[in-house]
Amino acid sequence: MVDQKEGLSTAESLRKTRSYGQVRCHNPSCMGRLQPQAGVNQVKCPACGMEYRVAWIKSGFPRIRGPVWDVNQRLAEEAFERKMKEERKDGPK
Amino acid sequence: MALNRKIAYIDLSTGKIEIRPIPIDVRRKFLGGRGLDAYLLYNHTKKGCDPLGPDNTLMVSGGILTATLASATARTHVMAKSPLGGLLGSCNMGGFFAPELAWAGFHHLVIKGKAEKPVYLWIHNGKIEIRDARGLWGKTTTETQWAIREELADEDIKSLVIGQAGENKVRIANVMTGIKNSGGRTGMGAVMGSKNLKAIAARGTMDIKIAYPKEALDYNKRFIDQITSAKVNQTQGALGTPFIWGATNSWGGVRCRNFQYNQELYCDEIEPEALDEVCAETMGPYHMAGCFGCQVHCRAKYKIPTGPYAGVYDEGPEYTSQGAFCGEPDCRSIETLLTGNHLVDQWGMDNLETGSLISWAMELYELGILTKKETDGLELTFSNDEALLEMTRRIAFREGWLGNALAEGGIIASEMIGKNSFDYLIQVKGVSNLHSDERATPALALNIATASRGSDHLRSRPAIDLYHLPVEVMRKIYSNPVPYDGPLSSEHTEYIGKPWQVFWHENCYMAVDCLGICKYHTVFLGATLPNFEDWTKVLRYNTGLEFTPREIWDIAERCNMIERLFNLREGLQREDLKKGDMLNHRYFDEPCRRGAPDVVGRVIDREKFKKMVDELYEYKGLDKNGIPKPETLKRLSLENEPAHLV
Amino acid sequence: MEPMGKVLAITPEKCTGCRLCELVCSVFHDGVSNADRSRIKIMKWESEGLYIPMSCQQCQDAPCMMVCPVKAISRDEKLSRVMVNHDICIGCRSCVAVCPFGAMNFSAIDRKNFKCDLCDGDPQCVRFCDMKAVDYVEANRVSILKKKAAAEKISVARREAAALEREM
């Protein structure tokens, strides 16, 4: 027999964890939740300083379109130099 | 009903066709689709056979739920021994072919031998006919499909075809249906070409009885709602898979200039929103299309806006076209992207392999390992859009020394090129890596290294590992239907807990491929999408078969083990760079140079990687060499295989 | 006067071509999956990416009703639909021949005609179409909705023109 009033499955019960209107910072060590103001096209992560260009799938639904190239490229180059120095000091990890 | 769909054994050498039912106990062991295909491959292919010879066996199938109300049951699966790595060949595509095959009475085709002259198969309401295809030879993928419809005077025919690349036995040739739905990986188009099989045409009007129609309708509505309300699927529905490439590029997770960089900078022109603008300008505001029964509609429609192909209609481009015609060769033109995507669609060639192999050759050219002598004068440098498209053509038609070499796939080409060219070839088991960079994501690195069909993200990639899910959410997903109380980490640069995630996803994706539904409808890109528990319901309402979530998991594990047995029989060895569960040395030796600050500098730790493989082997019931322990085969009832149950 | 009732309102450009409507139509009416049994069908020009859903328009002066030699076809004003009484129908297929939309089908399996019956007021094609390419709305609302969509396009153009004027 088919039970018509089945309860929620695990996947269905997880639906409440969805976070509409928010995006995550793309920096793996940060992953902070960002909530861009309606209609803005740029956002800066308050936690780690990365800057992103924002696009809107629809009203209330933002998406990170990509990095602000100049800013994030500078951060990347600084990080690379720093890490390579550390590695030379400590030997490979 | 779905369960009375049949297997047809077709011998193209003799013209003999045999049609048999699929016994219910075989269904309960392998369900259908990829799982049953793997069983058929293991049982019907001779050990050590030439992948492009008549002894290779080609499987074509839909899943057990194809054309039922399970939501997005569009997937067609194709399997054979791969001409790329000599191991498992397998590809899977959307579109409308598998449902038509099911309405024509069949779930599985087993195609052996080689036709004397070009032929195609015509499958119609329980009957199969081998027809002359000499008039179709030389045609593009779409020309072939439209010509078959005209010849048989039926607009509703759906065909699985090869283009010129498949005819030329280019080892990276794909199998296609519709405008752009492609079974791209592992050179299945070359296998069809080697059998002189140009196309498989299907048309059917046979009922598939739904076990509980009202409940199936109601549950399908609920299932679809769960799927379409997910953020990831709404994004897919607006932008298609380019959004994944864009998001991955944003933090530095895509492959660029073969393997030199992990991010393409200043590529605004080929970002998903830019592509979407071209689609909207050329096709109007509603320019997304769906595969059979799917409400996600992730397939974009476009016309090439400029250049020699201006005004030509095509669909996509997907993630892999962005990687192939932009990130990898370091090109940033939307015209090159849309044109390249169109050319590989027409000639029937895997865009992923095309872009990877050409970019590899570009790096070799930069290093002086390849010169103008091998390229027949072509200036094969990175960021040379014209050279990229010209090389694409040369591969499809095997023109010039290098065109012909790359048409043999990476491994054979590296042997032809010689020197240390192989060191730069980014592949696993002879199959080029997706245009993603896994140096910052050990779980994803483990996935591509151990995937059964060679480097591949659709076999076991725990993509949701990138989302930093709370551990309690991960625990809910990963401790079902099999209990798991080991470590789990939200940190995607970590190594702990990852082997279990890869194992879980390997079984999850196998189950999906057996059912015949799309991975966007399961825990691939969205943590809240359906899995084992939910599938018991779609199976019951549509077929009447009762399964527990655990039983579906066990079936998936069994089917994965069959693939493993096939690979071992054909020579898989754990650390063999050409036939093993191993990554190119650059993953361990060259640090990431671009992307988010925490990605920069990352490499995969060789020792930790080795331990991850050990742990994954343990979950799979394999010994240290990757060979199944006798008790594992017993547990999965595979100790007597090959037993020719079908 | 009574309102005329709801009709299927099709917006072809919204159709994604997925054919879920065909699938649910056959399951709802016949308990089977078989697109050939569907009352609604997506006509496709695949090489151009055009998909057009076609179904019965439930005509006021329905040609099928006029042509039927045994008066088996009638209008059901309550649901604003055209219905076939299969107890009377002789299976001559005159209705199939005369329908200007090809919306009267004939089943080779059951050897009788079949057409859209609006699922007795809960059209399944509408229920499952996420895009609302097929919708079920009051007949007099259809043109209002189209007016609004067209007006929206004009309003965008007007705003752009006004902005240009200001710049000049």
Image: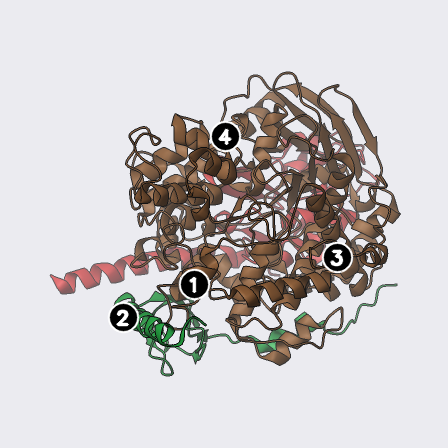
Chain colours: A green, B brown, C red
User: Is disc 1 placed on a helix, strand or loop?
Assistant: helix
Few, some or many residues within 10 Å of mark 3 (<14, 14–19, 20+): many
User: Residue type at mark 2?
Assistant: Arg
> Same subunit under labels 1 and 2?
no
Which badge, 4 or 3, comes first in the chain's sequence?
4
User: Residue type at mark 3?
Assistant: Glu
Comparing marks 1 and 2, which lies closer to the viewer? Answer: 2
Q: Quote the CA–CA distance across marks 3 and 2.
A: 46 Å
The reply to whether discs 2 and 4 touch (Cβ–Cβ < 8 Å) is no
Left or right: B267 in relation to B284: left
Few, some or many residues within 10 Å of mark 4 (<14, 14–19, 20+): many
Q: Nearer the viewer, residue B43 or B232?
A: B43
Q: Residue at x 66, y 55 (%)?
A: B71
Please, which residue is most extreme toward the bottom here?
Answer: A47
Residue B542 % position (x, y): 78, 54
- Quadrant where the C terminus of chain B lies? top right
User: Is disc 3 placed on a helix, strand or loop?
Assistant: helix
Comparing marks 1 and 3, which lies closer to the viewer? Answer: 3
Image position of A35 with respect to B260: above or below: below
> Same subunit under labels 1 and 3?
yes
Which badge, 4 or 1, comes first in the chain's sequence?
4
- Mark 3, chain letter? B
Q: Quote the CA–CA distance across marks 1 and 2.
A: 19 Å
> Same subunit under labels 3 and 2?
no
User: Is disc 2 placed on a helix, strand or loop?
Assistant: helix
The reply to whether discs 4 and 3 touch (Cβ–Cβ < 8 Å) is no
Residue C156 % position (x, y): 31, 60
Label 1 sits on residue:
B247
Q: Is residue A85 visible?
A: yes
User: Is disc 4 placed on a helix, strand or loop?
Assistant: helix
